[in-house]
Structure formats: structure tokens, C-alpha cells
Amino acid sequence: MLLRLATRLLWPARCAACNAFVPEDKAFCQDCELSVSELEQACHGCGLPNTNDGRGGGRRCHGCRDKPMPFSRVWTVLAYGGATTQAILHLKHGRRRHLARPLGALLAPAVAAAINSGVNALCPVPLHPRRLRQRGFNQALDLLRVAERLARRPAARPLVIPDGLRRIRDTPALGWESPASRRRIVDGAFAVRRPEWAEGRRILLVDDVMTTGATLAECTRVLLRAGAAEVEVVALARVC
Ligand SMILES: [Zn+2]
Ligand SMILES: [Zn+2]
């Protein structure tokens, strides 16, 4: 308790986007929150807002029914943009690693839902070792650790496999590449560190941002080849 109080005095809660003071349980200030958009009706196949009218569409959009991605379920929390983008950029490039706490808390309900639906291993999308050295941490792992702690029953054993995957090739930032060239760029970029851990598991892959899904799809293919029973993915933000 004392330690918590001390931490709070040293680092009072700040808005993850604009750095204004906020109540301790808030990630964003009121102004920034106006630009944060939750993806409540997202498609289970691609994580994008689902524009189906529900007639025969179920929880998947038309695109996903025609051409499904390799993962069996996508959980997305926020639309990329506005204060959400600011917060993620501060976390990744602004040396504000502590933002993983409020942002990871936003991810927790999706992680809890995935665990309740039978996921039994959680694994972050890895950074290439060179990028990890530059940044000092993998933001996806930080977000995952916070979310998992909040999502897991206290007595349950931890489900995080921090180094389940590794990035064997450093890929350039995917920027504005087309979907086809994104897939080419990430092809062969990942490997399973020890295939035994993945075998028969229902895995939840975690990343901060899902753009087209090329990176998550490639990681999924690698895990399925290693014997994973099923792979679901969760991203804090989805580029829409
Ligand atoms: Zn703000
Ligand atoms: Zn879809």
C-alpha cells in the first residue's frame, strides 16, 4: 500500500496521449477520450468494424467469409487514430514505457474473454533482437503482461510465453506497403523458439497495432506449422 502510494506521488497518473493529469484509473483525459473510438462490433475474422447487417453474416464480414485469415479469432479494442495513436507512439518511441500499464488495462477484457473461451498460452509478436536492443523493451510483451495479470484468476498459473516466437529477420517498417508486398516482407521473418511449447496449445498472439494483419498472419502460420491447435490474435488498436 505504502509502495503504491509512493509510486503514485512520484508518478501521478497522466493522460497517455497529452500528458494531462487524470484520475488513476483512466488512460485518457476527457478531451483526448473524445478521439478514442472503441471497436465494439468488430468482425471476428479481421478485427475491422463489421458492416454486415447481420443477415447471414454472423460475426464475420463478407471479406473474411470469402478469404479468411489463418487465425481463428481476432480481438481488437480501439480504432487506430487520434489519442490512441498518440499513446501508442509515446509508448513505443517516446520512452514512456509505463504507459503499458493503462494501455494494457484496456486490453485486459479482450484477453480475459479469450482465456475464458479456452486460450491457454499467450505470446507476444517479437521484435528483432537489434530493435529490442534499441528500444529496450517489447511493447507487445509489456502490454500482454499487464493485461494477463488483470485477466487471469489470481490462483491460476501464468499463461505468458514471453519468447515463444522470435524474429529471425529484421523487416523494415511496413508503412504504406500494399497487402501483397507486406506479406512478402514478413514471409520467413519469424520462427518458433522451441516448437514443443506450441504443440496442441490454443494460443493468443498479442500485438499493439494490427495494420493489415500480415505480421500476425505470418506468426500464426508459423505457430500452426509448429503444431498449435488454434491461434487467436488480439491487438490494442486496429488500423481501419
Ligand atoms: Zn489527454
Ligand atoms: Zn472481417
Image (cartoon, rainbow, N blue to C red):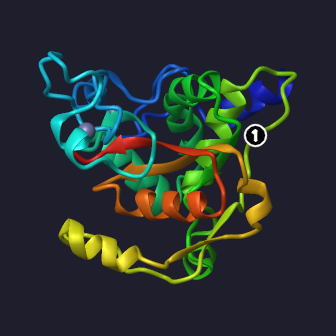
Residue 106: % across, % down: 49, 29
Residue 109: % across, % down: 53, 23
Q: Residue at x 49, y 51 (%)?
A: 207
Quadrant containing the C terminus is top left
Q: Is residue 7 left or right of residue 128?
A: right
- Picture layout, residue 232 above or below residue 77: below
Q: 136 or 121, which is in the foreground?
A: 121
Residue 201: % across, % down: 70, 45
Label 1: element kind: loop
Q: Residue at x 59, y 24 (%)?
A: 117
In terms of image quadrants, where is residue 80?
top left
Q: Residue at x 74, y 65 (%)?
A: 195
In terms of image quadrants, where is residue 113?
top right
Judged from the image, the quadrant occupied by ligand 2 is top left
Residue 120: % across, % down: 71, 37
- Picture layout, residue 208 above or below residue 193: above
Q: Which residue is mark 1?
A: 159
Q: 35 or 159, which is in the foreground?
A: 159
- Picture layout, residue 47 above or below residue 228: above
Residue kind at label 1, given as amino acid type: Leu
- Picture layout, residue 195 above or below residue 9: below
Q: Is residue 188 left or right of residue 8?
A: left
Q: 171 or 202, which is in the foreground?
A: 202
